[in-house]
Image (tube, rainbow, N blue to C red):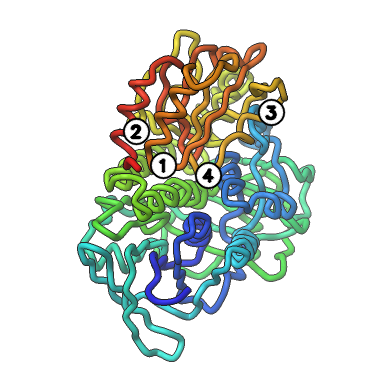
């Protein structure tokens, strides 16, 4: 890279690394900096859900992560010491059926390796200390390892630096929300000696009076223990001791004798939480992603996963506007979509039973209601869908046009499920194999048609007039998949796998109006 970069990304955690990979995939010169001396050596977040795994596959990162991690199958709830239900976590219609247990230090190391494959590396020990926006770009002041400050010009600056974001503060963007009171989370990675069965594909959730404990397997034979408790003394900031964690685990499980052997390197943490979201995620040439944009309690890695999906959402949009393929309004849709997603996650976290150490009345209600609820296949399926993030959608986005078909199936804004299909040649394919993060995909559902005068020919002639990269495919669904991919349907799928437009195969004018709005002409 010579001269000023196209993009400066501040922060090289998982979100910043994923965004830098996405931008490099589109050929943007990207400078990524971090004030740390290197990738973290702390485990921190420890699960990647199925939708984020699909996003990382798009960036060429999924295979090494899956090889390193553990695929989880179930979550087992115990209330007052008794099994109250099993949450199945495996999903159909995806190459990643279960969530992946993998810790943040490994995630960052593997993402950095992918970034290096693309010809870019992190500039470590380099902190952003100032930012000024111009109409055509930005200037970022960077303090290097020797303490000297230098200004770098760029077309775009993206903050992935966490909840204390310099960019957000420098631009006067409010961080709306408040701190949680009387709630703390204590964490320790350890090998337990206790009476619970050890299963590498099952996460255990223990709910008891004034404590909720999650015990999840992580690679290396260790268990991640984290517990939500009341917070009688918020001035205590030191990590929990081993005896403190043993007492917490004993209280949650009802076992009087519990012994924990901390893993090496040792990981223990005490955390309090805020529920906050930035007043806007875009201001001119500056954008906020991940914890710079939104924070909440770290249950089930939702901050990590929402940040990765935010980077996946932003990368292709920023590239399309930067290259002149799309109008500036496309980039505004990142703010709209990611804010809605973050607000939905925040609402769900406030109602999450795992985050609410119950009093005796609430514990009695949970003990009574959870077993019949968890015995319902419908409830369990809905739970798995929400956990996987497959039910997250962009239906309210300006990019989402059309409506649900007569036979149902995904709506505009929904993630396209990975169904088995046959192509026009009759070859069986996985639907996601036809998609690409580097382009849009126009799917015609039905039999192959003829030459230039056919609907397919007219659609190709139309899309050739527009700058957005796009590829055409004709597919047929079989069996139950026909309810999702009904014959006669036309789907215009975004690079991130969400449906932008749903209409009929003969509605060429509808496609033209959509592209007139979201693409430049060539």
Label 3 element class: strand
Q: Residue at x 33, y 62 (%)?
A: 156
Answer whether labels 2 and 1 touch (C-beta < 8 Å): yes
In this figure, which residue is indicated by the disc labeled 2? 515
- For marks 3 and 4, the one nearer the N-term is 3
What residue appears at the point 66 percent right and 11 percent down from the top-left corner?
479
SS of the residue under disc 4:
loop
- Please tell me whether residue 164 is drawn above or below residue 435 in the rendered image: below
Of residues 233 and 461, which is closer to you in this image? 461
* Residue nearest the observer in this picture, 432 or 311: 432
Q: Which circle marks residue 468 in the picture?
A: 1
Instruction: Return the disc, 2 or 3, that comes first in the chain's sequence.
Output: 3
Nearer the N terminus, badge 4 or badge 1? 4
State if disc 4 and disc 3 touch (CB < 8 Å): no
Relative vertical location of residue 453 with respect to residue 297 in this rendering, above or below: above
Tag nearer the camera, 4 or 2:
2
Q: Quadrant of residue 80?
A: top right
Q: Which residue is mark 3?
A: 429
Please give the residue where the numbered disc 4 appears in the rendered image.
437
**For marks 2 and 1 on the same chain, the one whose residue lies earlier in the sequence:** 1
* Quarter of the image with the C terminus in it: top left
Left of 418 or right of it: where is 467? left
- The residue depicted at 53 percent of the width and 44 percent of the height is 437
């Amino acid at each position: 890279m010579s001269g000023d970069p196209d993009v400066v990304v501040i922060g090289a955690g998982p979100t910043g690394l994923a965004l830098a990979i996405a931008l490099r995939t589109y050929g943007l010169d990207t400078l990524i900096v971090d004030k740390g001396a290197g990738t973290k050596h702390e485990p921190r977040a420890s699960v990647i859900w199925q939708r984020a795994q699909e996003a990382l596959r798009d960036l060429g990162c999924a295979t090494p992560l899956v090889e390193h991690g553990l695929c989880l199958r179930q979550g087992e709830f115990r209330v007052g010491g008794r099994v109250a239900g099993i949450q199945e976590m495996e999903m159909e219609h995806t190459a990643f059926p279960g969530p992946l247990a993998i810790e943040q230090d490994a995630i960052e190391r593997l993402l950095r390796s992918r970034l290096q494959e693309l010809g870019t590396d992190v500039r470590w020990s380099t902190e952003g200390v100032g930012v000024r926006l111009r109409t055509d770009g930005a200037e970022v002041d960077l303090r290097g390892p020797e303490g000297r400050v230098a200004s770098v010009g760029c077309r775009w600056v993206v903050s992935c630096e966490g909840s204390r974001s310099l960019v957000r503060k420098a631009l006067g963007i409010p961080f709306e929300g408040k701190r949680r009171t009387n709630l703390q989370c204590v964490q320790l990675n350890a090998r337990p000696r206790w009476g619970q069965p050890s299963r590498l594909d099952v996460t255990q959730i223990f709910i008891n009076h004034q404590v909720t404990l999650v015990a999840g397997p992580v690679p290396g034979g260790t268990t991640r223990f984290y517990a939500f408790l009341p917070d009688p003394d918020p001035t205590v900031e030191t990590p929990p001791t081993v005896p403190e964690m043993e007492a917490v685990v004993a209280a949650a499980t009802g076992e009087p004798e519990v012994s924990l052997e901390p893993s090496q390197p040792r990981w223990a943490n005490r955390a309090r939480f805020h529920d906050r979201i930035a007043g806007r995620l875009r201001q001119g040439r500056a954008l906020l992603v991940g914890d710079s944009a939104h924070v909440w309690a770290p249950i089930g890695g939702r901050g990590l996963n929402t940040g990765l999906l935010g980077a996946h959402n932003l990368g292709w949009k920023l590239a399309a506007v930067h290259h002149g393929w799309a109008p500036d309004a496309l980039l505004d849709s990142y703010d709209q979509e990611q804010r809605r997603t973050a607000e939905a996650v925040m609402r769900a976290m406030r109602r999450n039973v795992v985050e609410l150490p119950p009093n005796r009345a609430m514990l009695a209600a949970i003990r009574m209601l959870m077993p019949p609820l968890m015995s319902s296949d419908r409830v369990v399926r809905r739970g798995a869908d929400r956990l996987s993030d497959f039910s997250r959608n962009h239906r309210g986005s300006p990019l989402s046009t059309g409506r649900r078909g007569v036979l149902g199936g995904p709506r505009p804004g929904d993630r396209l499920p990975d169904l088995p299909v046959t192509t026009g040649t009759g070859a069986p394919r996985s639907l996601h194999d036809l998609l690409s993060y580097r382009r849009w995909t126009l799917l015609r559902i039905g039999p192959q048609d003829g030459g230039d005068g056919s609907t397919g020919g007219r659609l190709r002639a139309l899309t050739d007039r527009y700058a957005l990269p796009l590829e055409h495919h004709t597919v047929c669904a079989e069996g139950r998949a026909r309810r999702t991919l009904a014959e006669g349907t036309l789907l215009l799928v975004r690079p991130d796998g969400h449906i932008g437009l749903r209409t009929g195969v003969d509605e060429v004018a509808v496609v033209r109006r959509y592209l007139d709005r979201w693409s430049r002409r060539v």
